[in-house]
Each structure stands twice: as structure tokens, then as C-alpha cells.
């Protein structure tokens, strides 16, 4: 009886440790990277208003799958004055294209315009 229990334990352990045969490839996503340099005349309150307005888009536009942002902290000094990075993820080119003309995004751009000195945008598909 003891041998049967040991064999059953070994069999159960082998099954639970066996590699999953059905491995799926990660889903590719479209990343929309936006970098801003604000006008020197824009106050911290103005910049906060832009940050908040951009962040609010995630709750207003369902096409956005993921969203994150932050400010530059690199010690390299290669940011060319760009201080803010916004990272928006979409499932398709169409979703990104629809986002660009979405009324909520268009309204956000109007909040941004008076404070924007420079912008860089790069879109890429994850690999």
C-alpha cells in the first residue's frame, strides 16, 4: 500500500510539473509613445492640468487598452528638453487612428496646445 501511495504521489508531481503543451504567443500590441517639452512660460499648474487631462483619456476612450506616464529621470542628459513621456497601448492601427480623431482626444489637444513647445511621437508594434 505504501508503494502505491508513493507511486501515485510521483505520478501526480510529474503531471503538475510537466510543461504546458499549449503555449500561446503573446498578443502583439500597438504602442503609441508621446514625448512633450512644455513652454518655459507654462506654470507647474498648467503642466498638471495637461497631465490630468491626458490621464483622463483612459477613462473616456475605450480604445485605449493600457496607459502610463512619467517624467524624465535619466542622468544622461539626452532628452533634448523633453520632460514627459506618455505611453498609450492599442489593439490595432484602426483603434489608434480612431483615437486620434476621437472628440475627447481632440479636446485634450486643445488643453495641451498653449503649453506645448515640442512633441515627439513614435508608434510601434510589440515584438
Image (spheres, rainbow, N blue to C red):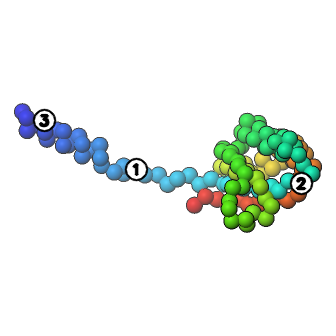
Q: Is residue 38 left or right of residue 87?
A: right
Q: Nearer the viewer, mark 2 or mark 1?
A: 2
Between the residue at mark 1 and the residue at mark 3, the CA separation in whole angstroms equals 30 Å
Residues 38 and 12: in front is: 38
Secondary element type, mark 3: helix
Instruction: Check the picture and name the quadrant holding the C terminus.
Output: bottom right
Between the residue at mark 2 and the residue at mark 1, the CA separation in whole angstroms equals 52 Å
Residues 69 and 78: in front is: 78
Of pointers 2 and 1, the one earlier in the residue sequence: 1
Q: For residue 22, which numbered disc appears in the image? A: 1
* Residue pointed to by mark 2: 39
At a point 88% along the width and 46% down the height, the residue shown is 43
Instruction: Check the picture and name the quadrant holding the N terminus.
Output: top left
Q: Are marks 1 and 3 in contact (CB under 8 Å)?
A: no
Crowd around label 3: few <14 · some 14–19 · many ≥20 (10 Å): few
Between the residue at mark 2 and the residue at mark 3, the CA separation in whole angstroms equals 73 Å
* Residue pointed to by mark 3: 5
At a point 73% along the width and 65% down the height, the residue shown is 77
Amino acid at each position: 500500500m505504501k508503494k502505491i501511495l508513493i507511486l501515485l504521489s510521483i505520478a501526480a508531481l510529474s503531471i503538475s510539473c510537466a510543461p504546458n503543451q499549449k503555449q500561446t504567443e503573446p498578443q502583439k500590441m500597438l504602442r503609441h509613445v508621446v514625448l512633450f517639452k512644455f513652454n518655459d512660460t507654462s506654470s507647474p499648474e498648467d503642466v498638471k492640468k495637461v497631465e490630468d487631462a491626458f490621464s483622463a483619456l483612459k477613462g473616456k476612450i475605450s480604445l485605449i487598452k493600457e496607459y502610463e506616464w512619467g517624467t524624465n529621470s535619466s542622468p544622461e542628459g539626452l532628452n533634448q528638453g523633453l520632460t514627459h513621456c506618455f505611453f498609450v497601448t492599442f489593439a490595432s492601427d484602426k483603434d489608434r487612428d480612431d483615437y486620434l480623431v476621437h472628440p475627447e482626444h481632440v479636446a485634450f489637444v486643445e488643453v495641451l496646445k498653449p503649453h506645448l513647445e515640442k512633441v515627439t511621437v513614435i508608434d510601434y508594434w510589440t515584438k
